[in-house]
Amino acid sequence: MTLNEYSSLLSKTLNISDFQDISLNGVQIDAEDREIKRAAFAVDASLSAIKRAVEWNADILVVHHGLFWGRCETITGDHYKRVSEAIKGNLMLYGVHIPLDANETYGNNAVIADLLCLEDRVGFGDWKGKEIGVEGRLREPKTLKDISETLGFDWDRVRIINPQNREKFSSLAIVSGSGSGEIDEAIERNVDLLVTGEIKHEVYWKAYEAGLSVIAGGHYRTETFGVKSLMKMTEQLGIECVFIEEDTGL
């Protein structure tokens, strides 16, 4: 499989053309087409992630947070350093944002739901007419700590609203990254718990006073699931893969 064939496969698998997104999803930096042997994966297209991918001789770096976000941006400063490093390393950069949150097989929210054995799933969390999250019921009710451990969250860094509402939780809504915009929908749907990455200060009292429990495991941590899932899919194609861990702690 060539590099261009692989990037086209990603775009088709994730249906990137179906989504309106602030990210310019797909190939963000091109490279010489060739037989793909190595693929690197990361949450963010940081300079260090690009350098590590180049040092590992990757043909492509697949990220959730790319470099281009729907506006004309000058290639200067830190932006220049990232772009230049990829071009010098003949590294293709592929970014995929909202489609990787929403995908029912490889998406962040779907994988979280799989790990929690969530049943009776329906869509949750509107993004410009597309549901990107998941709502459902746990096969067996779990404590907040059980949920945190299942998802690999750092219990010492987890943030929780209304932890005392119940000992174990059954109905869940899941939206990776920042879940502040889905507080109202979670309240309206009367779920026991919203699982997300981070929440903004201004929505705390809305959730608290409505009796909604929220567990925020970290924006970065909840968005590792999608790229790791794509990595597993890629390994099945016979391509050597590596995940570049750069936990921001946020």
Image (tube, rainbow, N blue to C red):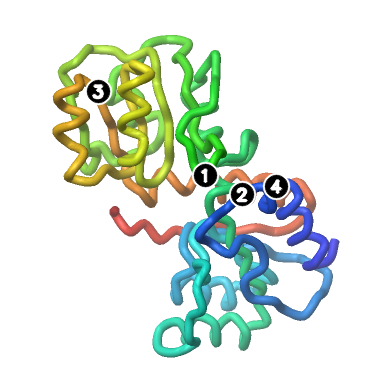
Secondary structure of the residue carrying numbered label 2? loop
Residue at position x 52%, y 66% in the image: 66
Q: Going from the N terminus, do you reach mark 4 or mark 3 first? A: 4
Q: Amino acid at mark 2?
A: Phe
Secondary structure of the residue carrying numbered label 3? loop
Q: Residues within 10 Å of mark 4 (few under 14, many from 20)?
A: some
Mark 4 near mark 2, Cβ–Cβ under 8 Å?
yes
Q: Is residue 80 above or below residue 44?
A: below
Q: Going from the N terminus, do you reach mark 1 or mark 3 first? A: 1
Residue at position x 28%, y 32% in the image: 215
Between disc 4 and disc 1, the foreground one is 1
Secondary structure of the residue carrying numbered label 4? loop
The one of 107 and 34 positioned closer to us in this rendering: 107
What number is the disc on residue 212? Answer: 3
> Marks 4 and 2, how far apart in space?
8 Å
In the picture, measured across the screen, residue 149 lies left or right of residue 49, that is left
How many numbered circles does the render carry? 4
What number is the disc on residue 15? Answer: 4
Q: Which residue is mark 2?
A: 19
Residue at position x 70%, y 47% in the image: 15
Quarter of the rendering containing residue 150: top left
> Marks 1 and 2, how far apart in space?
8 Å
> Marks 1 and 3, how far apart in space?
24 Å
What number is the disc on residue 128? Answer: 1
Q: Amino acid at mark 4?
A: Asn
